[in-house]
Image (cartoon, rainbow, N blue to C red):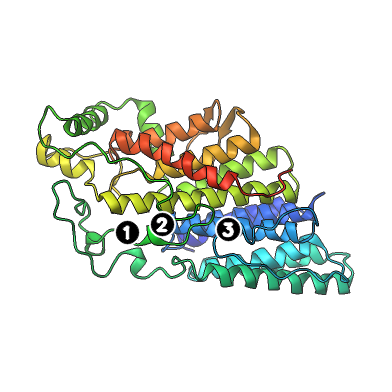
Amino acid sequence: MTILRQALHAAMLAVLVLCGSALRADPAAEVIRTWYRLALELVRHTPTYSPPVASRSFAYLGVTAYEVVASGVPDRPSLAGQLNGLTALTARDAHARYDEAAVMQVALATVVRSLFANTGPSGQRAMAAMTARLDARVAESRDPAVLAASRAYGATLAADILAWAVTDGGAVIDNMGFAHVYVPGTAPGAWQPTSLIVQQQAPLLPAWGQNRPFAMPLGSACPVPPPPDYSEDPASAFYAQAAEVHATTTALTDDQMRVARFWADDPMLSPTPPGHWVAIALAQLAGENADAGRSATVLARLGIAVADGFIGCWHEKYRYDLLRPVTYIRRLIDPTWVPLLITPPFPEYPSGHSTQSGAAAEVLSAAFGARPFTDTTHVDDGMPGRDFTDFRAAASEAAMSRLYGGIHFRAAIEQGLLQGRCIAAHALRLRMGDN
């Protein structure tokens, strides 16, 4: 059994154990958390799942879970008519009876299988096994007519969501997300490839910023101001930023190295940055034994904010097309410099980690308050948890981790956090009958 298969098998078994021999007091809430746990593992093992792609999937999972809940609660508003392009969804039959866990199970199983259709054989087996296990659990002691109506409605609702999703511009990831043809910028300070991999001579997902957002009106809705003017003058603000990165990374403390690695969240090695924040939210929801309505609302709003965060950030990245610290520092300061982390293959400004973390922190602060918490996302990866006074403190550390890793200048970090807060405001204005 390969390492990939071992990891997925172990993760699936762990998730199934969490289900227990029977679903808990709120079976629909347990179905939500169970599928999310598996999705976090699938993100690790699906090759096209770069952070923007992962954020998109978490948004659609959250919207699906939320709409299942909203469809069964008369006074809970649908997101149809609030999210871009989402028109009226199929309503429940007023004369039929439904089981909420059964509706949730079919809807989420269908959407997960679609979103991760290109995962490998081990992931396919994991999804099939999870579907069979949860199908059996939600069917226990259920009236057959209620079960049939519930499954049919869950499938219909999922089909509505997926038909909407396929039109957003991000449904098809070709060539692992790298453009087949890319004309590099010629302006001083324009991004240059930082990898020797042939495929990465073009940057990742250059059109992602043109995708249809969820809650914000356009990818350009939360612009960032220009970075410091590019200059190679040692007395310039731009040079000072690069000198800061160089000085910091050549004298990293042990804790700064831990911070950089804790928040690295590299594709194929982690649930990616958006998955990291989803894991934080799941832990908070589990800690308060949240019901399905509460769980779906938090996860949907978080997914929407983070997905819009990547669209907004990518819009600005390709507008400014700024080179990375490794390019500038090796050219002008230290030709032998090696950053702690591998530089991602796309423009520098603003920082994606910062934008999506700023957005996530605002949503979680609104949902849970300014509570202290321990982030245990990477405990199973051998990294101890990290303690934070609140979600905004965690976002600030996640953002600064990119300077410690040698990946971003300070302006990208600071402006990314501000951009994330702007983007989160759109998600927080959604009417969701928060409970």
Tell me whether the residue at label 3 lies in contact with that at label 1, contact meaning CB atoms closer than 8 angstroms: no
Residue, disc 1: 204
Out of 416 and 371, give the one closest to the viewer.
416
The alpha-carbon separation of the residues under discs 3 and 1 comes to: 26 Å
Residue, disc 3: 83
Q: What secondary structure is marked by label 3? A: loop
Give the vertical position of 401 relative to 94 (above or below).
above
Residue depicted at 72% across the width and 69% down the height: 154
All told, the count of numbered labels is 3
Tell me the kind of residue under disc 1: Leu
Q: What secondary structure is marked by label 2? A: loop
The mark found on residue 166 in the picture is none
Residue depicted at 65% across the width and 66% down the height: 109
Dot 2 or dot 1, earlier in sequence: 2
Tell me whether the residue at label 2 lies in contact with that at label 1, contact meaning CB atoms closer than 8 angstroms: yes
Residue depicted at 75% across the width and 68% down the height: 91
The alpha-carbon separation of the residues under discs 3 and 2 comes to: 24 Å
Percent across and percent down for residue 147 are 83, 70
Tell me the kind of residue under disc 3: Leu
Of circles 3 and 1, which is in front?
Answer: 3
Q: Is residue 32 left or right of residue 329?
A: right
Out of 278 and 366, give the one closest to the viewer.
366
The alpha-carbon separation of the residues under discs 2 and 1 comes to: 9 Å
